[in-house]
Amino acid sequence: MAFHPDKCTVLSVTTKRKPIKHNYTLHNHTLEPVSSSKYLGITLQSNLKWDNHIHDITAKANKTLGFLKRNLKTANQNIKDQAYRALVRPKLEYASSVWDPHTKESASKLEMIQRRGARVFCGTWNVNGQHPPISVAKWLQRDDVPPDVRLIRLVGIMLIVYVKDPIVGSVHFVDADYVPTGIMGIMGNKGGVGVRLSINNTSILFINSHLAAHQDEFERRNQDYRDIAAKMKFRQFVPPLTIDEHDMVFWIGDLNYRISGLEIDVVKSMIEHEKFTDLQSYDQLHQQLGRSPDVFPGYMEGKVLFRPTYKYNPGTDEWDSSEKNRIPAWCDRILFKGPGINLLQYREHSELLISDHKPVSASFEVQVKVVDEEKSKRVYEDIMKKLDRLENDYLPQVKLDKTEFTFTDVRFIEPMEHTLTVSNTGQVPVEFEFIEKLDEKSYCKPWMTLSPFKSVIAPGDKCEVQLEVYVDKSSVAHLNSGMDQIDDILVLHLAGGKDFFISFLNILVNGNFIASSFGCSVEALVQMHGPIREIPVAQLVEIEQPGSLLKRDMTQGGRLYAVPKEVWRLVDHIWQYGQKESSLFQQPGLHKEILAIRDCLDTGVPDRIPGSVHSVAEALLLFLESLPDPVIPCSVYHRCLDCSNNFMLCKQVLSQIPECHKNVFVYVCAFLRELLTHAEENNLEVKFLASIFGEVLLRPSKQPSPPSAMGSEHSSARAMAKEEEMKRAAFIYHFLTNDFYE
Amino acid sequence: MAGRQGAQRPNGATQGKICQFKLVLLGESAVGKSSLVLRFVKGQFHEYQESTIGAAFLTQTVCLDDTTVKFEIWDTAGQERYHSLAPMYYRGAQAAIVVFDITNQDTFARAKGWVKELQRQASPNIVIALAGNKADLAQKRMVEYEEAQAYAEENSLLFIETSAKTAMNVNEIFLAIAKKLPKNEGGGPTQSRQSGVKLNNEQTQQSEGGCCK
């Protein structure tokens, strides 16, 4: 097959911004490069968009639609419908599978919006303050086809918009505004009034204005226009709508522009000879319209092929014969702006005589955008659905390898660990964080640590979170007493992008804790006759109840230890094996040995406490530190500090604390004094012991840690802490250098 | 299209405004909360739906005549051990669907418990719907329609029997909630001083049109 070079063009499709241009030749004929070309009835574009095609077919379809409207005016609905389906729709739908509109705009252009013709009639008449004693029908009912919208102006500045009954339902958002430009810029004898409305989806604005008078004042008239254009706002809308934001504007009224540059006789003679076109070139408005950027920019006017409408002797068709002898002028005008406005008639009505002006009227056919409600709703719902899908697809999503973790046989100061793997299975980065539950201060119990507790995971990636349970001296007491359990729900919170894209995942933590004498109260310990492991849990819970000691006193009095046997065993061990050892309470013990010591105390076997004497010394300190209420109870802590410089007062405080606490205190101090008698061998110093045991025996009640302050506040808090430390040591010092019973 | 369009400019498309609401699903485990959401949002149904272990979040939009209601749906874990967490999820919710299984009387009792809790603890204006799910298993019914209906009426709840499996009434329940939710009109043109004067209306007096100021 041979190609005709004239019928071939080159269309290159590329994403390059600067495509390389080749010259293609066919039969020695260089082919013309084009950016769009028609092939099999479809317009292809080099950017692979279809807007040219859509533009072409909508234009074509509109043409046919216009043809049908003109020729099937009187046909019934059914025939119109058939014609539409046969002649218009195929144009729109031809090969639609190829160019299937994929952009929202294209689709909605085709689907939702159809245009409908509407007729607008505008009339303007400066009646010079006269009431019409005559029928105005000749002015207002001139067309065979009655208009849908009609607009008139009368006395002063008055604007009435009439809407034909059948389309009242399509009219919405009616609003009005006015701009006075008369005397002082506030009087209403000059100025403009506007009425706006929407017919279906087209916004239409009518403005009637009376601009400044007098032959030479056209600059004032221009200024009046600019004032009205700038100031007219329809405040029903947010933000207020301006004139230029309307699809169509009809600007009518006594605009007062005159004919200048010709003698009055010349003007009148030209009018007699109906040389309106020639005469119009002397019209002040005509000279500026479309030329001056700030006088009615964008507005158009029909050809003025009628006699000037000003100034007549009222009641006649004769030109003004007063002294002023005014030059005739086209004062009364009808301007319009916007697409889809087709002027049908523009004329004056000389048969109405009462005023020095003649009425002017124009009728238009305008194209009103009509949204097909059903299609529009469908398109809207489709879009919303797509948005929902996108939104849901892009929600953060994770998978957890496990959602339940069991920690079996958790023991004091023995860490236990599990790993949670959080995988990002969604399409967006996920930010996760463990969050507090309602009314809780922390996202997990004090015996638990999560690391990391927050992080960001990229799509497809994962993050391992270590869940560690570690019961230390601060959390052991509640677990011993049954007030707390190895049991928690962790809430993992996901955030991605915006904050409201959130979900929660619950992770269950459970397990059991093996009670230890570490972390039992002195009151409970002195009631325990066997090792703690041999005591039933229920009994443990019972003896940990406040006041349990008093109850026991009454029923089974006399069966209490003076000091907890665990304290006695630890002290006795050090006394036996370590009183001459140097660096006591200074050299750290071994963790493993401390665990063995814990088990020995809790189970009662073996008889001899295992481990080095340093481990035992550390265990003693830990034991005393783990007491829920310290040896010197929290309740008297501050009094102890206050009287730390007076031994007698310190002794008085001691006489007020519970017997068992006092016994432990006296016993420990006696032991320390004993150790100090061997200071030559073990090198212990009284100040060192006072300081160490000050920390262990005296503790304030747990307060919420003071907010971390900056600068001077911080340093003053540090100074206070230092002072408290000194006082604690001073308090103990008395008892290490004096016998309590002296 | 006409009417309350909020502060919308008149030139553009004239769909109504979008109201966003938080909706939470509550109910005993395995009554079909997640299945209802999945059916509503994605049109799917899984015979073996995994148990929800937290609160899953999805969005879905419902178009009414004059407004668009966008639901932020929180599907919660039904297991009793997570009960203490529920206030985190229903706090601030404007709507709740309390779901029970019509083949299981216990789940209906539990649903009543949820309704009571919501009435006590949730926002006072919360719109509550009661959904009797698994309506496709009517032959195993243990909760009579009339019983649930009477309970719902007493407590001014919406009540619909649904089936996530057959999709019966799933969209309907969300739609009913969307309709019942208050959509406050914030500003904007209220239908504009009903446009003008009807000239051929006999009672119409002399029209006042004075703009001459």
Image (cartoon, coloured by chain):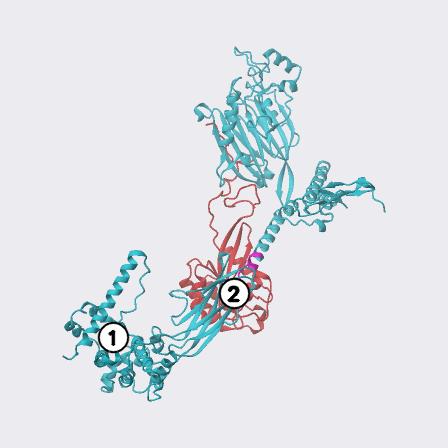
The residue nearer to you, when weighing A295 against A188, is A295
The C terminus of chain A, quarter of image: bottom left
Q: Are the residues flagged by discs 1 and 2 from a single subunit?
A: no
Image spot of residue A449 (x, y percent): 42, 70
Cα separation between marks 1 and 2: 71 Å
Image spot of residue A343 (x, y percent): 64, 30
The answer, for residue A278, to whether it is visible in the render is yes
In the displayed structure, A203 sits above or below A672; it is above
Choose top left, top right, bottom left or bottom right for residue A635. bottom left
Q: Which residues are magenta?
A: A390-396
What residue is shown with label 2? B131
- Residue visible at 55% across and 32% down in the picture: A206
**Of helix, strand and loop, which one carries label 2?**
strand
| Colour in which chain A is drawn | cyan
Q: Is residue A684 magenta?
A: no
The residue nearer to you, when weighing A223 against A65, is A223
Image-based side of B12 in relation to A528, left or right: right
- Amino acid carrying label 2: it is Ala
Residue at the far front in the pictured view: A680
Image-based side of A535 in relation to A465, left or right: left
- Amino acid carrying label 1: it is Leu
In the displayed structure, A448 sits above or below A233; it is below
Question: Dot 1: few (<14), some (14–19), or many (≥20) neighbours within 10 Å?
Answer: many
| Colour-to-chain, red | B
What residue is shown with label 1? A689
For the image shown, how many numbered marks are present on the structure? 2
Choose top left, top right, bottom left or bottom right for residue A92. top right
**Of helix, strand and loop, which one carries label 1?**
helix
Image-based side of A371 in relation to A594, left or right: right
The residue nearer to you, when weighing A124 against A699, is A699
**Residue at mark 2: chain:** B
Image spot of residue A505 (x, y percent): 48, 66
